[in-house]
Image (cartoon, grey):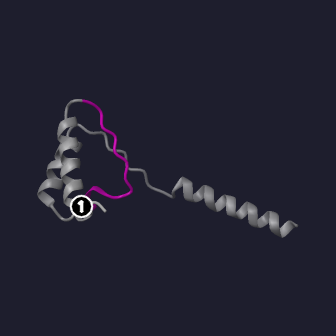
Amino acid sequence: MFSLDRTLAENSRLISYRYRRGTTAITTNKSVKDWPGIFGGDEALVSAILDRLLHEAVVLNIRGRSYRLQNMEEMVDRESFARSES
């Protein structure tokens, strides 16, 4: 099992290293406002990470249904229809 403190510290070092050196892409299904709670409530460290990540960032916020979930539902519907036709 991993420690949240250790993971947060490692992420902080990685983001600090990457800051202004190159592109960093992060994907998540969590809002930025939820990050302090996710990372153990260390708001100061999360704030420092976000400061570096969001400086000169392009943030894409995609809303709507998950394509994976939608594809799964369509597949289940097709299988159910095929069984009912048999």
Residue at the outermost right position: 86
Residue nearer the viewer, 11 or 80: 11
Q: Residues within 10 Å of mark 1 (few under 14, many from 20)?
A: few
Residue at the outermost top position: 21
Which three-letter amino acid code belongs to the residue tagged 1?
Answer: Ser
Q: Residue at x 26, y 30 (%)?
A: 22
Q: Quadrant of the N terminus?
A: bottom left
What secondary structure is the stretch in magenta mostly built from? loop
Secondary structure category for the residue under label 1: loop
Query: Percent position (x, y) of residue 31?
Result: 31, 58
Q: Is residue 10 magenta?
A: no
Q: Is residue 7 visible?
A: yes
Query: Circle 1 sits on which residue?
Result: 3
Q: Is residue 50 visible?
A: no
Residue 66 lies left or right of residue 52; in this view the side is right
Q: Residue at x 37, y 53 (%)?
A: 28
Q: Quadrant of the C terminus?
A: bottom right
Query: Percent position (x, y) of residue 80?
Result: 75, 67
Query: Percent position (x, y) of residue 9?
Result: 18, 52
All told, the count of numbered labels is 1
Specify the quadrant of the image occupied by residue 25.
top left
Q: Residue at x 23, y 48 (%)?
A: 11
Q: Is residue 23 magenta?
A: yes
What are the residue bounds of the magenta stretch?
A: 22-36
